[in-house]
Image (tube, rainbow, N blue to C red):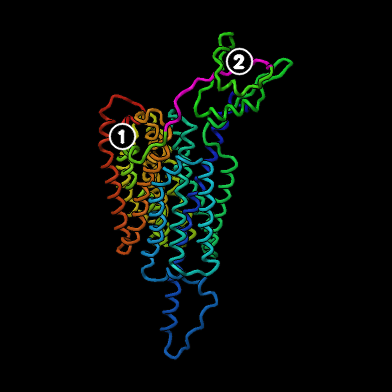
Amino acid sequence: CAPVTPSNSTCWYRALTFILTFLLYTSFHLSRKPISIVKSELHKNCTSLSELATIASSGGGSQQPSPPSLHADMDCSWKPFDKRNYKQLLGAMDYSFLCAYAVGMYLSGIIGERLPIRLYLTVGMLTSGLFTCLFGLGYVYNIHSLGFYIFVQVANGLVQTTGWPSVVTCISNWFGKGRRGLIMGLWNSHTSVGNILGSLIAGYWVSSNWGLSFIVPGLIIAAMGVICFLFLIEHPNDLKSIHAPNCSPGKSVSSFYLYFFVLNVNTTADLYLPPFSPSLSLLQSYDTELLLPRESVCVPVQPVVVVKRESEPSPISFMGALRIPGVIEFSLCLLFAKLVSYTFLFWLPLYITKAAHLDAKKAGDLSTLFDVGGIVGGILAGVISDKLGKRATTCAVMLLLAAPTLYGFSMISEFGLGPTIGMLLVCGGLVNGPYSLITTAVSADLGTHKSLKGNARALSTVTAIIDGTGSVGAALGPLLAGLLSAGGWDQVFYMLMTADFFALLLLLRLVTKELTSNKSRPISAVE
């Protein structure tokens, strides 16, 4: 954008909105990541203590039992996650958060359509920061109640649902359909950036004080909530203002009257400023006349003419959103795609710890490469779908390639660091590419579908339905991983490949429609 002037101010505000919403949702994912980093540290310490206790007890029958360590809770496992079924307990922690997130998402979109986005998002970020910090305070205050951690996870899952429908609606308000895939692909890299930053921040304290691995991200998202309240502009229409032109000596129309007028007609009238002619003075409506002083006034050179139009459409219902062509297919596809993505999000560091025999910090750092690949995959998916005009086909091809890549990753990760790094990048791109495209560009396309006849107030509800359905898969994936990993990690990878297959299967109708169509433009499968 050029230097700020009244004529190009919208361009600058568009850039501000892009950057601000990017940072806001980065903080959401940043605050979700610590639990996956802390898992491997908890189990490693528990195992270490068990081995030491076994050695001490078998060293000699006459030996006195060694006195307990003064810092047993810090140096050992963190109860109640010190049992043999620790994987199931940690899986239940993930499930409690993600299940609450999935249920809350369906309500969040409907509520978000009816409340100011800025306030709704601010409250969600502040409360999310509170509950993230509470989890870390469990370490500070030596809390060992499973119920406490489950409650915090459920509450945090509910309040985090305020984020996605709000930021997608906001960014879609500012950016049209032109090159939406590229713009959304770049913008959606906030997911991977948040995961990377969350891993690095949590990994910095995980071995010394894992409570700070939660408290610091919690403070960050709360601070971003304050920034959201101060600077977020929801819609370009919020920038509308009309200033009275300069007049010759005499009384002029007060700018207060004009500002008051704009605020009151903003949702019920279109404003036009045609060149002045005597005939136009006859068009002055009774509404505007009431706002003018009764005494003699200077008539502006360009008087405001008000043309009444229909009132704003009401928000769409839940069932009405489901009837939009393509919503059900993409929602169910996202269920399986997000199952795969979130299984990696919550279990990848622990898998790397076991497969590559690395400590918690190194495993957390290495797992960020999956998110680096996800950034590239999301951008590529957006660019390709813009170029071809075929969203469903782009997703289907990436899903088709992801399944054998997952199998290769399960094999190659045992043969050294180099192949593991390469497969992490490739898997990240192919797994997160479809997930990114569906949650952003596809959701925005469907939320502004032609069947809505210009009703832009459906976007938040459609986004919530698609992401809420996907979140059901996000809840099931980590839970199933916790159960299946007890029988070996191979079973987890077979589950992930099966999920990819079902995601591909659900898109076949839309892919067929796109390939048999002569059109070459975005969302052809859902028009």
Whether residue 154 can be seen here: yes
Residue 474 image offset from top left, x and y in percent: 37, 51
Question: Dot 1, how many residues are within 10 Å of its Cα: few (below 14), some (14-19), or many (20+)?
Answer: some
Q: Earlier in the sequence, mark 1 or mark 2?
A: 2
Would you place residue 81 above or below residue 402 in this image?
A: below
Q: Residue furthest bottom?
A: 62
Nearest the eye: 372 or 143 = 143
Q: Amino acid at mark 1?
A: Pro
Whether residue 393 can be seen here: no
Please name the predominant secondary structure of the magenta segment in the image: loop
Q: Residue at x 52, y 58 (%)?
A: 214
Question: Dot 2, how many residues are within 10 Å of its Cα: few (below 14), some (14-19), or many (20+)?
Answer: some
Would you place residue 313 above or below residue 368 in this image?
A: above
- Find out whether residue 524 is within the magenta segment: no
Residue 338 image offset from top left, x and y in percent: 36, 48
Which residue matches tag 2? 302
Q: Viewed as shown, does residue 271 lie left or right of 406?
A: right
Nearest the eye: 33 or 291 = 291
Which residue matches tag 1? 325
Q: Residue at x 54, y 51 (%)?
A: 126
Q: Quadrant of the C terminus?
A: top left
Q: Amino acid at mark 2?
A: Gln
Span highlighted in magenta in the image: 296-313
Classify residue 154 by image quadrant: bottom left
Q: Residue at x 50, y 49 (%)?
A: 124
Q: Quadrant of the N terminus?
A: top right
Nearest the eye: 500 or 322 = 322
Q: Say what secondary structure mark 2 lies in.
A: loop
Q: Say what secondary structure mark 1 lies in.
A: loop
User: Does the CB distance between marks 1 and 2 fall below 8 Å?
Assistant: no
